[in-house]
Amino acid sequence: MSLEQEVMGLLIGGFVIVMGIVIITTTLIWYKNKHKSYVYTWILLHLLLFSVAVYFLLGAISFDTNHLMASEEISLRIGIAGVVWALSMLCLLVGVYKFSKN
C-alpha cells in the first residue's frame, strides 16, 4: 500500500507513545492494587499481544507491492494480525471477567 513517506513513522511513533502510557499506567495501578494481581497479568498479556498484532498489520501496510508474491504475503500478515488480535481480545475478556468476579 502506498503511503506518504512520513505516515509510517507517525503511525509507529503514535502507537508506541499511547501503548507506553497505557502499559505504564496499568503497571502503576497493578502496583497499588495487589489484591487482584493475577488479573493484571491478563491485561498486560492483552497489551503485549495487541502490540504484536499491530506489528504484523504495520508490516502488511508497509510491504513492498513490487514483490513477486506481494498479495499473498500481505494477506498472510493481515491474517496473522487478525489471529493475534483475537487472542489479545480473549485475554482482555478473561481479565475483565476476573475483575468483575468477587
Image: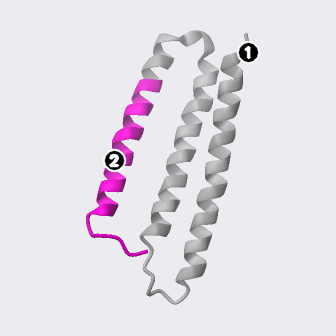
Look at label 1 and name its amino acid.
Lys
100 left or right, relative to 48: right
Which quadrant holds the N terminus? bottom left
* Quadrant into which the C terminus falls: top right
Asked if the residue under mark 1 is in contact with the one under mark 2, i.e. CB atoms within 8 Å, the reply is no
Q: Position of residue 68 (x, y in %)?
A: 52, 90
Q: Tell me what residue is drawn at x 38 percent, y 37 percent.
A: 20
Q: Residue at x 46, y 24 (%)?
A: 27
Q: Amino acid at mark 2?
A: Gly
What coloring was used for the rendering? one colour
Task: Give the vertical position of 34 relative to 8 (above or below).
Answer: above
Residue 60's x, y, as percent? 50, 68
User: Mark 1 sits on what residue?
Assistant: 101
Looking at the picture, does residue 29 appear above or below residue 71?
above
Q: Nearer the viewer, residue 5 or 56?
A: 5
- Magenta includes 84? no
Dot 2 corresponds to which residue? 14
Which residue is at a point 59% across and 28% down the rendered structure image? 41
Of mark 2 and mark 1, the one earlier in the sequence is 2
State which region is magenta.
1-26
Could you tell me what secondary structure mostly forms the magenta stretch? helix
Q: Residue furthest bottom?
A: 68
Q: How far apart are labels 2 and 1 at the CA level? A: 34 Å
Depth check, front residue: 89 or 27: 89
Residue 13, magenta (yes or no): yes
Is disc 1 placed on a helix, strand or loop?
loop
Q: Is residue 6 left or right of residue 99?
A: left
Q: Give the side of residue 59 with respect to residue 14, left or right.
A: right
Measured from the top left, where is residue 14 in percent x and y? 33, 47
